[in-house]
Image (spheres, helix red, strand yellow):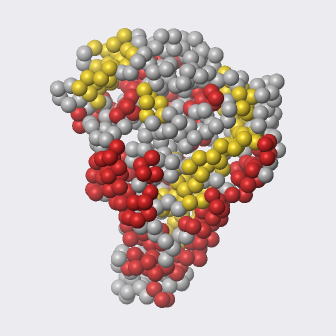
Amino acid sequence: MKKLLTLAVAALMTVSLAGCGSSKAENKLVVGQDKMNGEFIEGFGNNSYDKSIRDLIHGYNPVIVDNDGNIKWETKVTLKGEPAVKNNKDGSKTFTVTLNDGLKWNDGKPVTANDYVMTYLMRASKSWIDANGNPTGYEIEGYDAFSAGKTETFSGVKMIDDHSFSITIAAKNLPYYWEKNFLWSYPLPAHVVAKDVKITSDDKGAKIAKKDQAAIADYVKNTFLKNPTVTCGPYKFEGFKNQQVQLTLNKEYAGNWEGKKPSIEKITVKAIDMDKDVDTLVAGEVDIVAGAIEAEKIDKVKAQGDKFTISSYPRNGYGNMPISCYYGATKDVNVRQALAYIVDTNKIAQAAMGAYGKPCYSDYGAAQKVYIDNKEWVDKNLNTYSFSIANANKALDKSDYKYEKDGKTPFDAKKASKDYLRYNSKGEVLLISHLGSEKNTITDNIKLQLTKNAPQVGIKYEITVKDFETMLNIYYQKQKAEVKYNVYNMASGFNEVPDPEADYHGKYEKVANFNPYGLNDAELNKAIENLKASKDEKEFSENWKAYQKRWNYLLPTIPTYTNDYYDFAASKVKGFKTTPFRDWANSICNFSIE
């Protein structure tokens, strides 16, 4: 799945409560990034800047992703050895997890199996789904009945004792290439979000009353989501005001997957003007700016010499123009392909990134091992959709938008102009409504290109600009009254597990917060299922090729570029190193202020 699995193309952001900059005496770090929605519990939003805060305040996940992108059990601090695995007669598989002793919440209360079990039940409950939370746990035995509210018992989740619990994966969801990820879950404090709620467990599974499910979902969404004061990550949440988050060291934290603990006492994460993020860094108002892609910004920091530490790495994602495959003219794959042909992605990449921009043709990240291993195949087998007015017209001639205004007379491409447009057989004009984010060089470049190129193929192209947060909400259909756009421009970063099901499988075409493209293609669905069921790396590689080939044809989004990310830190931030799989927030235990 993608983060955002979608983020704004620029980087990172806000107003100071206590003053700008940092001080060695205070042992304080100030990070500038883009605007946050203020959703600091996973499950309600997909803003990558909120995720930075979540990664700092939550912890003790049984599963981690290392610096190279490998999924591993976290046995250094969280687990007492790898989970015991039992293959059941019905084809299901049970993982029994045992927690290490001494894990604590930041209020000193012990972290127990009850916290994990409560979290599993909460995130799969009908009340959670009714509250527009993203459900998780669908792969667990008994999920369908529990999530539909048909039973109060989740049969695949069982609490054994204070330090042990088990998860049983349904046979229908096996095999699964990223099997360890079935146990990905950071716990929430049951003594806070489920106070006075009794969770029972027996051979039939873990049980929680429906009224308690509703109370927990209500409390998390309306209180804890924006003010998660009790957590178990390296930092404590102190407050969010004026687009600024204040964090302090969690002295109860037992350590990360390497056994390391943070040393920086205070962190301020604030929104800044992303047009001037590097200027803000150079001026000393922030200590870290991450995710820079623009050549001008990168070169400006390089010119500062040893005043800053630079960490660069291939992007585990790509810039793109997501398309509503369920709405208007872009329901037709030929229209989507035509749009790809009239966007000169090389110009987009060069305009923003100069020599740092690279082409991208499908749903992959340059940092992914499977892409690196198959780069030659990608270059030979995928349509690059190189800029071509002629090819765009050929694609549109295969669509129903091949007529003049009367819906009968064939469209003459030689006459194409803003006054001579394409229509379908119903006499409807070929209208594309684009929603872009403000203060964004990509939006500006796309607007320049399509204002010029769209009329050349008979497309009426309209572009609206809003702030990124509003655009993201509309994109995920939270503001249903405004689902009237065919195209957006964003950028996507892949999740720890690049499983495309939640983004593109047809079973999610009408599910809120999932598959925002509304795509439902039988061949792609099958390719996704095959990818997930790969038994080894070789089979995964072949299934990945089939998936990319079909995705490249369907174009639920137009890839515009990929690139290297550049993260910058003031020289006083020691140990500053980031990777495609571990950003600054995930690497915080390696940093210190000197």
| Whole-percent x, y for residue 45 in the image | 51, 40
Q: Judge by depth and name the residue closer to the eye, 444 or 536.
A: 536
Residue situated in front as seen by the camera: 164 or 452 = 164
Among the 4 quarters of the image, the one containing residue 107:
top right
Name the residue rendered at 49%, 77% in the picture. 388
* Nearest to the observer: residue 313 or residue 288: 313
Q: Quadrant of residue 309?
A: top right
Q: Residue at x 32, y 56 (%)?
A: 546
Determine the residue positioned at 64% across, 61% down. Answer: 355
Question: Which quadrant holds the C terminus?
Answer: top right
Say above or below: 156 vs 355.
above
In percent of width and height, residue 178 lies at 37, 37
- The single residue placed furthest to the left in the displayed view is 89
Q: Is residue 139 visible?
A: yes
Work out whether residue 186 or residue 218 is closer to the camera in this orientation and state it: 186
Residue 299: where, in percent of width, then height?
73, 55
Q: Can I make out residue 532 in this image?
A: no
Is 70 positioned to the left or the right of 96 in the image? right
Image point (56%, 37%), residue name: 582
x and y, in percent, of residue 100 in the image: 46, 14
